[in-house]
Image: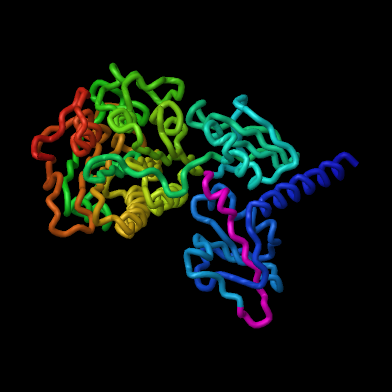
């Protein structure tokens, strides 16, 4: 009997969760989007389609779905009716219904099975997610409401004046996972305040050796190679030396322009705070209305190494590069994209087989991430205002590797990469920096942060210096 009761309870919770998900959509009978299907699901109910659309793996792109009433299928889409000129309503037999995410919810970033713990300002009962979103944004609360947690089981929500980034992240281990978290973010973004409409796209590739790109016998990397051809590359930016060649110190140095003895991050311990300002926070110090975004699957990057004032933060599933890519594509689809984006790709840091540039497994991981980068570069060039924007694309790694590991001070473990390009798909534009810089000794403190600050016209207050041939 206990097992039966537990099973019935599980079904009830699942049904309530699905019904709540369906409340997030506007319904149009006998209509569909024609030709804009992204993912097809079979043997599902409308409630299940709604839950799938809102799921963490799709929340960065899914905004509507068409439901096949006769066959119990649905097509999830990254387009709304308004994006494609309206709905088609003259299908023979009217087999479809259309569900578009409610506009009020499009102002929020959705995270399934998560909540802010202990920062609730106001509780609403007997409400849908859309009603909570409307309440958060109405005139009486919009000056303080920044997020809400929705309890699918009880149909309640807690409005908060905090975002996850303000309190060290979301709690994701509630028994039974009753909560979903919604964080407010302007749908069209905030106008970029930097002169010349300058932006930064920082692509972090964990464990990528600089000598694994462009060498004889190396794997083909069309996206990275094109960035190198139109910009500058250093194939041996020296990580380590005074610190371990592991991710915590490496990314902290990339982000600050200091070594571990000053930035304070000496290992991968998530409790070690960043003692020097993150370059994205330096951007905000110079231009307070600039917006910054981070997507990463490694907890340190969304916690102790996170910019203190990050506006958009997405934690993708472990080594799910497509989810990270989709988050960046969504930011790039905004009318006003973030001023600076950090896009983290984890799969090259294999900890298996070999970090040798000629190793087939290592090469396959590099090729896979290169294909992800190509998607983002395509989305960047497709921006309607891209011609009037000035984007510096920076590619960096935290360390190299030897055999199946890293952390020591061998040449292979210290070998990181730096790519700088501001001419993507802009023929005739003067490069910020060009050529192969590898003959010049540069260390990791001289890499990301000094060049980003220089490109954006901000003072360099770091221990590093940009390469003399870059910039003005």
**Where in the figure is residue 320, as x and y percent of width and height?**
47, 47
In the current view of this chain or complex, which residue is farthest to the top? 261
- Is residue 1 toward the left or the right of residue 433 in the image? right
Q: Quadrant of residue 333?
A: bottom left
> Looking at the image, which residue is at 21% across and 48% down?
421
Q: Looking at the rendering, in which quadrant would you find the N terminus?
A: top right
In the current view of this chain or complex, which residue is farthest to the bottom? 92
- Is residue 135 toward the left or the right of residue 83 in the image? right
> Looking at the image, which residue is at 45% across and 29% down?
303
> Looking at the image, which residue is at 60% across and 36% down?
148
Q: Looking at the rendering, in which quadrant would you find the C terminus?
A: top left
**Where in the figure is residue 5, as x and y percent of width and height?**
86, 42
- Of residues 370 and 434, the one nearer the viewer is 434
> Looking at the image, which residue is at 49% across and 43% down?
316
- Of residues 118 and 208, the one nearer the viewer is 118
Question: Which segment did they paint magenta?
Answer: 90-109
* Whether residue 368 is visible: no
- Is residue 238 toward the left or the right of residue 193 in the image? left
- Of residues 121 and 424, the one nearer the viewer is 121
| Residue 124 vertical position relative to residue 276 in the rendered view, above or below | below
* Whether residue 246 is visible: yes
**Where in the figure is residue 314, as x and y percent of width and height?**
47, 41
């Amino acid at each position: 009997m206990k097992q039966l009761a537990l099973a019935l309870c599980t079904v009830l919770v699942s049904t309530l969760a699905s019904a709540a998900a369906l409340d997030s959509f506007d319904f149009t009978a006998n209509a569909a989007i024609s030709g804009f299907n992204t993912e097809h699901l079979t043997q599902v109910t409308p409630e299940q389609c709604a839950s799938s659309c809102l799921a963490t793996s799709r929340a960065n792109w899914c905004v509507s779905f068409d439901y096949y009433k006769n066959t119990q299928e649905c097509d999830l889409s990254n387009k709304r009716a308004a994006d494609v000129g309206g709905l088609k309503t003259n299908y023979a037999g009217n087999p479809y219904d259309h569900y578009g995410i409610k506009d009020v919810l499009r102002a929020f970033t959705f995270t399934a099975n998560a909540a802010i713990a202990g920062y609730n300002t106001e509780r609403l009962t007997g409400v849908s997610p859309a009603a909570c979103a409307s309440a958060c944004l109405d005139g009486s609360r919009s000056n303080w409401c920044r997020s809400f947690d929705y309890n699918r089981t009880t149909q309640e929500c807690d409005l908060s004046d905090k975002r996850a980034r303000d309190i060290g992240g979301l709690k994701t281990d509630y028994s039974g996972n009753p909560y979903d978290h919604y964080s407010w973010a302007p749908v069209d973004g905030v106008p970029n305040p930097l002169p010349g409409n300058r932006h930064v796209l920082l692509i972090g590739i964990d464990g990528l050796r600089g000598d694994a790109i462009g060498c004889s016998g190396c794997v083909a990397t069309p996206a990275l190679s094109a960035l190198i051809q139109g910009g500058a590359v250093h194939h041996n930016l020296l990580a380590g030396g005074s610190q371990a060649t592991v991710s915590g110190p490496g990314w902290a140095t990339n982000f600050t322009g200091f070594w571990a003895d000053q930035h304070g991050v000496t290992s991968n311990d998530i409790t070690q705070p960043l003692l020097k300002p993150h370059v994205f926070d330096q951007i905000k110090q110079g231009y307070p209305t600039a917006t910054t975004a981070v997507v990463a699957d490694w907890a340190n990057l969304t916690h102790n190494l996170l910019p203190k004032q990050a506006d958009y933060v997405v934690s993708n599933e472990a080594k799910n590069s497509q989810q990270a890519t989709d988050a960046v594509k969504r930011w790039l689809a905004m009318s006003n994209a973030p001023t600076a984006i950090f896009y983290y790709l984890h799969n090259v840091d294999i900890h298996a087989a070999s970090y040798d540039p000629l190793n087939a497994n290592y090469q396959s991981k590099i090729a896979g991430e290169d294909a992800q980068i190509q998607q983002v570069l395509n989305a960047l060039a497709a921006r309607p205002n891209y011609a009037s924007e000035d984007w510096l694309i920076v590619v960096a790694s935290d360390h190299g590797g030897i055999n199946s590991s890293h952390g020591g001070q061998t040449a292979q473990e210290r070998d990181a990469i730096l790519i700088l390009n501001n001419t993507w798909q802009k023929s005739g534009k003067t490069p910020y920096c060009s050529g192969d810089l590898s003959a010049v000794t540069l260390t990791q403190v001289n890499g990301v942060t000094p060049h980003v600050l220089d490109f954006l016209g901000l003072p360099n207050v770091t221990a590093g210096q940009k390469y003399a041939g870059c910039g003005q």
